[in-house]
Image (spheres, helix red, strand yellow):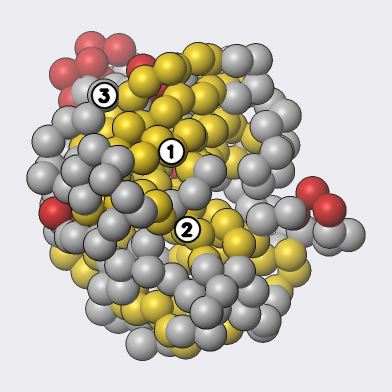
């Protein structure tokens, strides 16, 4: 298990969410940010912002599509998002927490992605940015004699966790689909100076070598794009230790050669927002 302190910073030239939204020269990042992650009382409301932006937590490019998001409660059952609005640069909604425990808000998708060179020498991408493609559609729409054909199976997940009262683990349970966080330390129990053990799984199995990028809030007000970068060990495990409180954006990427036909590559991307509290 690899321990990386946030105080050991590495300058990161590109913090791209390319697996989520395709390679992009502007390195847009997606995020789903609650105004707080831990609340008390018999019930509470939490407001979320969701955006695809150039910088973390500063909506300046595109609102995240609300129709892609789902929420589940402490019992694993669906919870309705309320007071939703899709603005120019961000989407907003409220989540009414009425039962104690942990809630998950997320988007998860899977697609076949193909790249090739056409007869005019131009690079082609199917099914197009922001779209998903099935094996059946691939057989119908991608030329069977495509030159330099590369086919990948791509899984994407964007999520955030919030807790009313005491946390529980039902909403945290991995589904066995795509790249997922197995939270060995509860994501709503993160404190400055305390180690947080985590693991990444790909389709329910350890995801060794998953690359991880961690960025603290207020990136906009720093002179350089500074991030912590690390890799999961052979068991997909890693440990975080935070030196400052605040909201953090974490992106993880994984790939191997275990894609299901017609794919040869299997790729996963994952984004989550953590809140780290002072002791």
Give 3 or 163, whichever is nearer the viewer. Answer: 163
Q: Is residue 160 visible?
A: yes
Name the residue: 26% across, 45% down: 42
Left-right relation of 91 to 54? left
The mark nearer the N terminus, 2 or 1, is: 1
| Mark carried by residue 207 | none
Residue, disc 3: 80
SS assignment at label 2: strand
Marks 2 and 1, how far apart in space? 15 Å
Whether the residues at callouts 2 and 3 have beta carbons within 8 Å, the answer is: no
- Name the front one of labels 1 and 3: 1
Distance between the Cα atoms at labels 2 and 3? 22 Å
Q: Residues within 10 Å of mark 1 (few under 14, many from 20)?
A: some
What's the distance in space between the residues labelled 1 and 3, CA to CA? 13 Å
Vertical placement of residue 103 versus 242, above or below: above
Q: Is residue 182 above or below residue 77?
A: below
195 vs 143, nearest the viewer: 195
Q: Say which residue label 1 marks.
A: 46
State which mark lies toward you, 2 or 3.
3
**Residue 274 disc label:** 2
Residue 35: give x, y in percent of width and height: 53, 43
Relative vertical location of residue 188 with respect to residue 39 in this rendering, above or below: below
**Percent of width and height locating residue 99:** 19, 43
Q: Secondary structure at mark 3?
A: loop
Label 3 neighbour load within 10 Å: few <14, some 14-19, many 20+: few
**Left or right: where does residue 84 sit relative to residue 7?**
left
**Residue 242, horizontal then vertical, whole percent:** 56, 77
């Amino acid at each position: 298990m690899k321990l990386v302190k946030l105080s050991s910073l590495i300058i990161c030239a590109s913090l791209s969410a390319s697996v989520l939204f395709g390679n992009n020269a502007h390195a847009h990042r997606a995020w789903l940010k609650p105004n707080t992650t831990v609340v008390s009382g018999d019930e509470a409301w939490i407001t979320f912002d969701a955006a695809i932006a150039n910088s973390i937590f500063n909506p300046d490019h595109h609102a995240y599509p609300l129709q892609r998001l789902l929420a589940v409660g402490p019992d694993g059952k669906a919870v309705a998002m309320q007071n939703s609005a899709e603005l120019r640069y961000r989407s907003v909604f409220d989540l009414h927490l009425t039962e104690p425990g942990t809630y998950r808000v997320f988007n998860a998708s899977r697609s076949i992605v193909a790249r090739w060179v056409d007869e005019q020498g131009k690079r082609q991408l199917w099914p197009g940015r922001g779209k998903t493609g099935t094996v059946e559609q691939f057989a119908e729409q991608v030329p069977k004699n495509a030159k330099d054909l590369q086919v990948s199976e791509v899984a994407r997940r964007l999520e955030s966790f919030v807790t009313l009262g005491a946390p529980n683990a039902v909403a945290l349970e991995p589904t066995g689909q795509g790249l997922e966080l197995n939270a060995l330390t509860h994501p709503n129990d993160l404190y400055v100076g305390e180690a947080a053990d985590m693991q990444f799984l790909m389709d329910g199995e350890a995801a060794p070598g998953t690359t991880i990028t961690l960025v603290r809030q207020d990136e906009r007000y720093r002179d350089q794009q500074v991030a912590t970068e690390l890799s999961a060990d052979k068991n997909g495990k890693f440990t975080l230790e935070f030196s400052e409180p605040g909201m953090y954006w974490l992106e993880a990427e994984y790939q191997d050669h275990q894609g299901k036909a017609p794919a040869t590559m299997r790729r996963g991307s994952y984004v989550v927002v953590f809140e780290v509290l002072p002791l």
